[in-house]
Image (cartoon, helix red, strand yellow):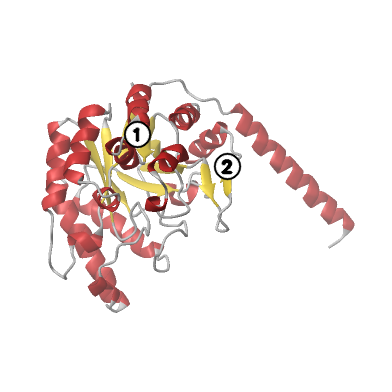
Amino acid sequence: MSRALRVSLLIVGVGGLGLFLLMLWQVKPVASQPVYGATFSPAYARFLGLDPYKVLPAMLDELPLQQIRVPIHWDEIQPESKQARLDELDWIMAEAAKHDVGVILAIGNKVPRWPECYTPVWAKQLPEDEYEQALLEYVDLLVTRYRSDRSLLRWQVENEALFPFGVCPRVNYGLVKREIERVRTLDPEHPIQLTVSGEQQLWVTQAKDADVIGASMYRKVALPNGWMITFPIPPRFYGLQALSVSRFVDKVVISELQAEPWLTQDYRDYSLEEAAALFTPVQLQTYLRYAQSTGLTEISLWGVEWWYYLKQNGYPGLWEAGREYLN
């Protein structure tokens, strides 16, 4: 490579970085009252030793939430082939209707909460073509059953499908697109949400396939070596990413705002006092203000089950702070 070419490339690179920083600075947050929601995972509630049939009513009775996102685990719905256990999900939808709260149903194989992918044992043993057919039939089952439910706001198809996180098979985005098409065909009335890592992906990668882009927002996380870091990202970064997808989608939302600690060991290894100190009401307030300053007007909290766990064990600080701050 000639010296002149290297200089030209350097100039282009510096100019591009300067333009990016200028755009980042010029993206102004829009002042607006956010719509607040929360992810509710019955499986996570059970993992924390809680009764989901008590956690959800408490969330909807005591916290000013306008919507919930529910990850549906394939292995719980269809532990056996051609079987469907839908009683709990039916109850969730009925409870949401009772409280006049909207529901986003996260469907597919990869849905929120570690290990992300919940493939039934029987489906893991299928040849690839039969596995794909089984997954599409599972999607058909859910869409057909809940498309007319008055609490349904939209469908989320898979979770951060192109982000390599979780114990999951190799990404087949062609299959994800077929899932999206099945949902659109069976239910043309409700929007489709696709999700991305807010900090570690270009959101535009999935925007053309979505009606709504949901971005996660994590502030303090653990590296693979266990070290904790806080992402050095200004709120305007999210505004710029939202601007980059605005011509493709109807809405951009925060699908997961970190509102619980990023644990590096089993929660039962901490004393309750230690657990309560891992994520404080001050952090919650700081993270909410950060999210609000992006200008994105729909914010879904991640970790309300954790608040309830602490509350039930004599540490109600996060629960009470959440109720206050969301008001």
Quadrant of the image containing the C terminus: top left
Residue 83 screen position, x and y as percent: 12, 66
Residue toward you, 299 or 141: 299
Question: In the drawing, what numbered circle is on residue 33?
Answer: none
Write down the residue under mark 1.
Answer: 315
Does residue 38 appear in this view?
yes
Please give the count of numbered marks on the rendered protein: 2
Left or right of residue 313: residue 297: right
Residue type for callout 1: Tyr
Does residue 199 appear in this view?
no
Q: Residue at x 48, y 26 (%)?
A: 289
Residue type for callout 2: Phe
Write down the residue under mark 2.
Answer: 231
Within 10 Å of disc 1 (Cα), the crowding (few <14, some 14-19, many 20+) is some
Q: Residue at x 16, y 46 (%)?
A: 147
Give how far apart the Cα atoms at labels 1 and 2 are: 28 Å
Q: Nearer the viewer, mark 1 or mark 2?
A: 1
Left or right of residue 276: residue 26: right
Query: What element does badge 1 sit on?
Result: loop
Picture quadrant of residue 115: bottom left
Quadrant of the image containing the N terminus: bottom right
Residue 185 screen position, x and y as percent: 22, 53
Q: Residue at x 34, y 58 (%)?
A: 110
Residue toward you, 158 or 5: 158
Residue 43 screen position, x and y as percent: 26, 53
Q: Residue furthest right?
A: 3
Query: What element does badge 2 sit on?
Result: loop
Q: Is residue 263 above or below residue 17?
A: below
Residue 251 screen position, x and y as percent: 38, 36
